[in-house]
């Protein structure tokens, strides 16, 4: 699975869009980008995933660059409850049949009033 | 609420003891995963079961073992506990065993070894 690089921390004002970047320059053609978040010490929560097209769901949008070497998770209207550690994970659908998630350090997003 | 249930929420025990953590997956999910989160190691994959059979192993210590029962619930057994085993233990479940299956996590069990 490709390695990812994320900023250690970010701040965002409540009601504004939070844009969380992730670099994955070694991503290969069959690898997807997944985003999870962990609020305080709760269990990680799945947010979204994508391959090369931009994706949107009720929680967030995922923008993947054309060369797929980086992506951005967008929370369109951040609230205080979005304060969490956000993990960007790259993994392939054919990585030997193992579905383990490899978590890095993630980005600690602080949403302030 | 992810639909994954873990019990107990908190566990306090002493070094050398043995504990069992329990996980009930989401309805319909056949795969169960265990992860450990400690302050210095972050979230680490321990082991995966699919429909009662071990599927993949991560950095799980020999003192730790797991199983998945016919009703699909899973237990993680930790023995000869050491101070360093203090951590959050998360269970996740997915529909199948495949790489594309989304994992949904429980609220975790906080283990404190004194």
Image (cartoon, rainbow, N blue to C red):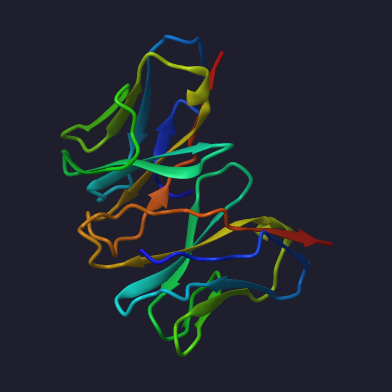
- Above or below B62: residue B108: below
The residue furthest front is A26
Residue B25 appears left or right of A109 = left
Q: Residue A31 versus residue B89: which sits nearer the camera?
A: A31
Residue at image position (57%, 53%) is A105
Image coords of residue A100 (percent x, y): 33, 52
Image coords of residue A70 (percent x, y): 52, 78
Residue at image position (42%, 86%) is A53
Residue A62 visible at all: no
Image coords of residue B82 (percent x, y): 47, 17
What is the count of numbered marks?
0
The residue furthest right is A113
Residue B6 appears left or right of B88 = left
Q: Residue A59 versus residue B83: which sits nearer the camera?
A: B83
Q: Quarter holding the C terminus of chain B? A: top right
Q: Quadrant of residue B47?
A: top left
Q: Residue A76 versus residue B14: which sits nearer the camera?
A: B14
- Above or below A31: residue A105: above
- Above or below B25: residue B16: above
Residue B39 appears left or right of A45 = right
- Above or below B76: residue A68: below
Residue A34 visible at all: yes
Residue at image position (25%, 51%) is B28
Residue at image position (70%, 76%) is A17
Image coords of residue B79 (percent x, y): 35, 16
């Amino acid at each position: 699975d490709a390695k990812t690089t994320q900023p250690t921390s970010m701040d965002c004002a409540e009601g504004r869009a939070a844009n969380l970047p992730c670099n994955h320059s070694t991503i290969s053609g069959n690898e997807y980008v997944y985003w999870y978040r962990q609020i305080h010490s709760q269990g990680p929560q799945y947010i979204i995933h994508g391959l090369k097209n931009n994706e949107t769901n009720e929680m967030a949008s995922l923008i993947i660059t054309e060369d797929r070497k980086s992506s951005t998770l967008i929370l369109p209207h951040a609230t205080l409850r979005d304060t969490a550690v956000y993990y960007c994970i790259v993994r392939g659908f054919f990585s030997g049949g193992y579905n383990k998630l490899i978590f890095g350090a993630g980005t600690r997003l602080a949403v302030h009033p | 609420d992810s639909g994954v249930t873990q019990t107990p929420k908190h566990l306090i025990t002493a070094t050398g003891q043995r504990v069992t953590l329990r996980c009930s997956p989401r309805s319909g999910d056949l795969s169960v995963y265990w992860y450990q989160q400690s302050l210095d190691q972050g979230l680490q994959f321990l082991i995966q079961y699919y429909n009662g059979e071990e599927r993949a192993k991560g950095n799980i210590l020999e003192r730790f073992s797991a199983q998945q029962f016919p009703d699909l619930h899973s237990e993680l057994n930790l023995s000869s506990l050491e101070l360093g085993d203090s951590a959050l233990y998360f269970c996740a479940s997915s529909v199948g065993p495949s790489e594309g299956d989304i994992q949904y996590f429980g609220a975790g069990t906080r283990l404190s070894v004194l």
